Amino acid sequence: MSRPAPLIPVSLRVPAALLLAGALALTACDGGVHGTPGARGLRDPYFPKMGNGGYDVTHYDLDLAYDPDAGKLSGTATLTARATQDLTAFDLDLDGLDVEKVTVGAHPARWNRAGQELTVRPHDDLDEGRVFRVTVVYSGTPKTITDPDGSQEGWLPTEDGAVALGEPTGSMAWFPGNHHPSDKASYDLTVTVPESLQAVSNGELTASRTGGGRTTSHWHTAEPMASYLATLAIGHYDIHRTTTADGLPVYTAVDPAEADASRKVLARIPAVMAWSEDTFGPYPFSSTGAIVDREGDAEYALETQNRPFFPGAPDTETLVHELAHQWYGDSVTPRTWRDMWLNEGFATYAEWLWAEDHGGDSAQKTFDDLYSHGEDDYEDLWDFPPGKPSGAAHLSDSPVYQRGAMVLHKIRQQLGDTAFRALLRDWPTTHRHGTADTEDFTSYVEDLAPDEDFGPIWEEWLYGEGKPDQP
């Protein structure tokens, strides 16, 4: 992501009554129009309405307050962005919540709502390349979103607070933004909650103060992060801070009900991190750790950046999987949701490698067992190829995970162990803090071994329908 140019103030103050125009549909600007509105979606193959065209967000500054008794969230979101075209208007993704005010620069802007789209019309057009700030003041009861696969995300109320999870679309339930994995940004999150509760997010806790019965915490994420990896967990947590052998901070937040069950596996974080760095290369973030909430508050673990989220005490394999995602998915992020196998295939293969390196089954045995009997445990294993999921409802199905890992094992067979181990380190290093798609990856593999023919792997294992004829 490019470095922003110096911020340029936008426009003059207009009468407050003009804000009422936000209820009206937007049309072309008045005289002097030289741009066009940004697109209302990025035409993702599975979520075409997600994301927005015409600008690139470089930083989110979120100032939030949550009242768990009333279930109410209030927020001010300030986005720093750069126009990638001449703009007369642009959209933000925000599903639910009531918008009270929108400004671009220091001055009011017109806006309107249509479904998940918050369309903003700045007073002056924005030239391509111009850096601007848009601020949205909003409040209300945040939504829990049901995914196409039936799982829940967005804002999930818990027994003592709430947890925000964003994959693939849930982040738009609690803050406005450009909610597509192709647009990554840094974050500052300030959150105020009742003083009896803790609020845990990504990155580093840089400040905390308590007064008047409330605690305000500030979290800073310096490294680029896709919005679906942003999290906020509010509740009662046992907080533990330690470091790995090489000094990397480890921050864990565990619901007291899960403390005993989690203690042994979380104590393995330094060992898992040491193995992961040896296997995948230098760790791409400034800290690691975990958030463990009460079992039943959510349905799945998620690789939220810096500290993965777990709904109950994880086992070692799940911990390995979610920490591997910090390289594959968090640092190297899928350019579209069609490329999700690059996240889940690598993280699943990390489980195979961990077992292989720690006295369990070899990756070859795991592969052979899946090929011979995989449908006994994963009845959908051969339903579609990992490189082309059959729909948004199937992005988390076993072809993306298990068959995605099988693709990697086929590459390993062809490259040999030495070159494959180099691939495991070089791919996330080359694309550190960036985005990549499947074509980027297949081209990268082919460039590693130009004399090898990877066509059959792509045709039969990555994109082929049904079970390949030969293991």
Image (tube, rainbow, N blue to C red):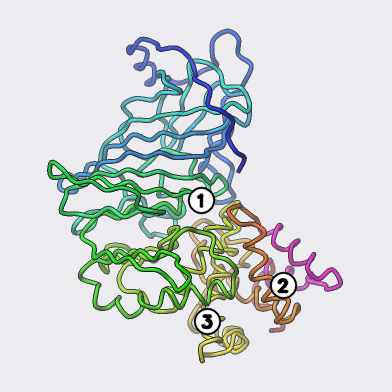
- Return the x and y of residue 151 as percentages of the image width and height: 38, 60
> Rounded to the nearest whole Å, what is the CA distance between mark 1 and mark 3?
27 Å
Q: Are marks 1 and 3 in contact (CB under 8 Å)?
A: no
Verify whether residue 444 appears in magenta.
Answer: yes
> In percent of the image, x 71 and y 58: which residue is there?
439
Along the horizontal axis of the image, is 434 left or right of 273?
right
> In percent of the image, x 35 and y 57: which residue is there?
152
Q: Residues within 10 Å of mark 1 (few under 14, many from 20)?
A: some
Q: Is mark 2 on a helix, strand or loop?
A: helix
In this rendering, does residue 327 appear at all? yes
Amino acid type assigned to the residue bearing label 3 in the image: Trp
Q: Is mark 3 on a helix, strand or loop?
A: helix
Q: Residue furthest left?
A: 213
> In percent of the image, x 40 and y 12: which residue is there?
13
Quadrant of the frame with the N terminus: top right
- Return the x and y of residue 421 as percentages of the image width and height: 67, 76
In terms of depth relative to the viewer, which is nearer, 10 or 297?
10
Amino acid type assigned to the residue bearing label 1 in the image: Glu
Q: Is residue 259 above or below residue 156?
A: below
**Highlighted range, magenta:** 438-462
Q: Which quadrant of the structure image shows residue 465?
A: bottom right
Q: Residue 223 has which mark?
A: 1
| Residue identified by numbered label 3 | 354
| Residue identified by numbered label 2 | 460
Total labels: the figure holds: 3
Q: Is residue 139 above or below residue 232?
A: above
Q: In this view, does 217 lie above or below 432?
A: above
